[in-house]
């Protein structure tokens, strides 16, 4: 059933806000790689989110707990695929690959999501959407090779790139599975349970890293990074993304995820002083055009 234009516009803006907030995740994964090991960084992120969010969601969690308990394995999978294991893989990848590579490989997630949505949810994959995806992927490739197509002949993946690709596939499963959350369970409950479960699962993994001799370097940058990841990249972004998927579906929300390299590229220029290149502008234009074309039905209040 078509959704209202206001609802779909709101959903698109929420997906865009979440994507912008998450793009900093790659920057922090590189900036904090020498300060905190991956599982510990993700555990502290989830712990901060728990401390800040649980007081507001506690009444919803208590009310919905019987429903959550009856499908606990589903919520454990949702928590790991969408938060705990997914972000831990990003932080592992950040130790051996660049911010730009991570952002580019993260955009494989929309392709995986669209394929899974087509077979599991029956979402439409028409020619307009395929054309938009092709344009967006073309923009991503242009950014990757910086205008030199001969780079494709010598393209190879390191371990960090492969880990990032695995994380993208995992996040695609989360995008599809979150649609199967019971409608009578509050979205705040879902998000709060994800923070709690991820913290519980990551605590022993973090303890193992520390016991194995991993160094923890506490600086103002480390604390600021953890606070951002806990408050913005966790609470704000997951709140926006969950509602975006409900409003416009995982396929449309994931197409907006293609704007990730644009945000990450701008952030890399501002914070890592990476020089801009003409391919950033040309590739960015292709990505934006592709997203607009692929999500055109949203303008008419359609979900697929």
Image (spheres, helix red, strand yellow):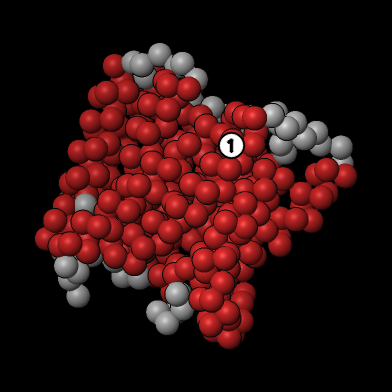
Judge from the rendering whether residue 140 lies leftward or rightward of residue 214; answer left or right: left
Q: Which residue is identified by label 1?
A: 225
In the displayed structure, does residue 198 sit left or right of residue 213? Answer: left
Closer to us: 153 or 290: 290
Query: Compared with residue 185, is residue 225 higher up or lower down, i.e. above or below?
Result: above
Relative image position of residue 44 (x, y in whole percent): 67, 48
Picture coordinates of residue 73, whole percent (x, y): 62, 75
Mark 1 surroundings within 10 Å by alpha-carbon count, few (fewer than 14), some (14 through 19), many (20 or more): many
In front of the other: 129 or 13: 13
Q: Nearer the viewer, residue 153 or 4?
A: 4
Residue at 22% across, 49% down: 294
Left or right placement of residue 217 versus residue 242 in this view: right
- 196 over 266 or under it: above or below: below
Quarter of the view holding residue 218 = top right
Q: Provide the secondary structure element on which disc 1 rests.
A: helix
- List the single residue furthest toward the front: 55
Q: Position of residue 115 (x, y in %)?
A: 37, 58
Quadrant of image for the N terminus: bottom left
Asked if residue 35 shows in the view, the reply is yes
């Amino acid at each position: 059933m078509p959704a209202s234009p206001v609802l779909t516009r709101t959903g698109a803006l929420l997906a865009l806000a979440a994507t912008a907030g998450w793009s900093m995740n790659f920057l922090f994964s590189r900036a904090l790689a020498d300060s905190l090991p991956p599982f510990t960084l993700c555990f502290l992120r989830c712990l901060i989110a728990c401390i800040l969010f649980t007081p507001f969601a506690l009444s919803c969690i208590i009310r919905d707990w019987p429903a959550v308990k009856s499908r606990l394995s589903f919520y454990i999978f949702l928590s790991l695929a969408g938060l705990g294991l997914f972000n831990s893989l990003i932080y592992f990848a950040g130790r051996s690959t660049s911010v730009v590579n991570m952002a580019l490989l993260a955009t494989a997630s929309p392709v995986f999501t669209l394929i899974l949505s087509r077979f599991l949810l029956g979402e439409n994959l028409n020619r307009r959407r395929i054309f938009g995806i092709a344009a967006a992927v073309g923009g991503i490739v242009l950014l990757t090779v910086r205008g030199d197509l001969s780079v494709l002949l010598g393209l190879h993946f390191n371990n960090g790139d492969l880990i990032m690709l695995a994380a993208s596939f995992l996040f695609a499963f989360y995008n599809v599975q979150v649609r199967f959350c019971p409608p009578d369970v509050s979205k705040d409950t879902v998000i709060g349970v994800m923070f709690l479960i991820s913290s519980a699962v990551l605590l022993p993994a973090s303890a193992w890293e520390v016991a194995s001799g991993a160094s923890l370097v506490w600086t103002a940058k480390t604390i600021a990074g953890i606070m951002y990841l806990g408050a913005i990249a966790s609470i704000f972004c997951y709140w926006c993304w969950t509602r975006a998927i409900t409003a416009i579906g995982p396929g449309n929300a994931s197409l907006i995820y293609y704007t990730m390299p644009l945000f990450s590229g701008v952030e890399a220029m501002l914070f890592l002083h990476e020089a801009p290149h003409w391919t950033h502008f040309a590739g960015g234009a292709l990505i934006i055009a592709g997203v607009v074309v692929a999500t055109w039905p949203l303008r008419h209040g359609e979900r697929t």
